[in-house]
């Protein structure tokens, strides 16, 4: 496929705050690559909008004040053409509050709006039986990995980049005809300083292969190659593995965090 040249200075984010009960945008079934659907975009559309309930509806804030769900499109400034997209789930520190049987992983699992991505993140890294704290296996022993992440993950707010290409269709995705021009790297750097991550301490992602057909899934060499490329992409952006888990983290507010000083080649792989 021929590459369509893009000027990075002509790109911007178009952010939707998803307030609907199911936690996905209303048009989530639409094909992102459908040109007819893309043509409906207007360059004058707002850079930020609230999608779902009316602005005066407090249902979401009442039940889950700690969770915000964003759908972010990468579009051109001049025509509003879709170039890429990704989803983001932002979790405020108040979700860590321990009260009776509730704690962070409990809330992430119980939240119907957070989706399977957030549920898997919570149960993989945090121990509900230990007040929702980081699992001991990532603090000591052979599964500690490089040890650049530790007890500090028990505090503060965080956000998780979505990896859902099937249901919400908000995985990190750049259209094939625009790839190879640094757009994905631009998007991650733009995200790190974007208002959606204001007061967020850590940004997490589970690098995965989502841009693959059903028939290609049986090609182990192809899948491994694509997975390695995705991991390399996030590592180049400063993300490092949490223990030996499948999740990578980035310290947003502490540029002296050990993970920010770990060289790419020194990051670990699962045992």
Image (cartoon, grey):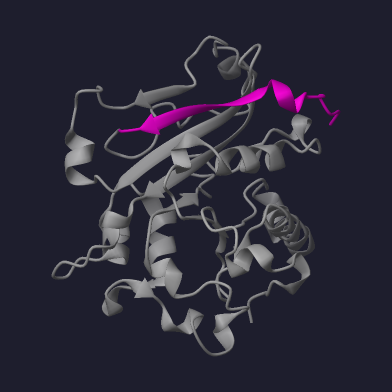
Count the numbered circles shown. 0
On the rendered image, what quadrant is the N terminus found in? top right
- State left or right for residue 94 relative to residue 83: left
Residue 83 at x, y percent in the picture: 66, 27
Among the 4 quarters of the image, the one containing residue 98? bottom left
Q: Is residue 213 above or below residue 208?
A: above
Residue 7 at x, y percent in the picture: 77, 23
- State left or right for residue 175 relative to residue 257: right
Residue 23 at x, y percent in the picture: 34, 40
Is residue 167 in view?
A: no
- State left or right for residue 211 relative to residue 147: right
Residue depicted at 58% across the width and 78% down the height: 147
Q: Is residue 17 magenta?
A: yes
Q: Is residue 101 magenta?
A: no
Q: Which residues are magenta?
A: 1-19
Residue depicted at 38% across the width and 71% down the height: 126
Is residue 3 in view?
A: yes
In the picture as drawn, the residue positioned furthest to the bottom comes out as 141
Residue depicted at 69% across the width and 38% down the height: 186
Q: Is residue 126 above or below residue 206?
A: below
Residue 264 at x, y percent in the picture: 74, 65
Among the 4 quarters of the image, the one containing residue 176? top right
In the picture as drawn, the residue positioned furthest to the front comes out as 256
- State left or right for residue 165 relative to residue 101: right
Task: Please name whichever residue, 115 or 61, is drawn nearer the observer in this view of the structure.
Answer: 61
């Amino acid at each position: 496929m021929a590459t369509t040249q893009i000027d990075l200075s002509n790109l911007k984010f178009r952010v939707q705050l998803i307030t609907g009960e199911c936690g996905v945008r209303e048009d989530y079934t639409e094909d992102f690559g459908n040109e007819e659907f893309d043509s409906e975009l207007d360059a004058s559309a707002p850079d930020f909008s609230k999608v779902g309930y009316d602005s005066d509806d407090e249902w979401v804030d009442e039940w889950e004040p700690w969770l915000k769900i964003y759908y972010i499109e990468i579009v051109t400034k001049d025509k509003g053409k879709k170039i890429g997209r990704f989803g983001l789930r932002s979790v405020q520190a108040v979700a860590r509050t321990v009260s009776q049987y509730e704690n962070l992983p409990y809330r992430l699992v119980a939240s119907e709006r957070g989706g399977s991505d957030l549920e898997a993140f919570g149960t993989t890294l945090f121990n509900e039986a230990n007040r929702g704290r980081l699992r001991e296996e990532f603090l000591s022993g052979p599964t500690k990995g490089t040890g650049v992440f530790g007890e500090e993950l028990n505090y503060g707010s965080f956000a998780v980049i979505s990896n859902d290409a099937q249901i919400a269709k908000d995985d990190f995705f750049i259209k094939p005809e625009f790839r190879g021009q640094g757009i994905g790297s631009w998007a991650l750097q733009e995200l790190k300083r974007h208002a959606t991550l204001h007061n967020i301490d850590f940004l997490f992602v589970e690098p995965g292969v989502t841009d693959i057909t059903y028939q290609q899934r049986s090609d182990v060499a192809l899948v491994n190659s694509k997975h390695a490329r995705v991991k390399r992409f996030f590592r180049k952006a400063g993300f490092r593995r949490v223990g030996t888990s499948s999740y990578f983290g980035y310290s947003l507010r502490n540029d002296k965090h050990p993970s920010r000083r770990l060289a790419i080649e020194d990051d670990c792989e699962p045992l």
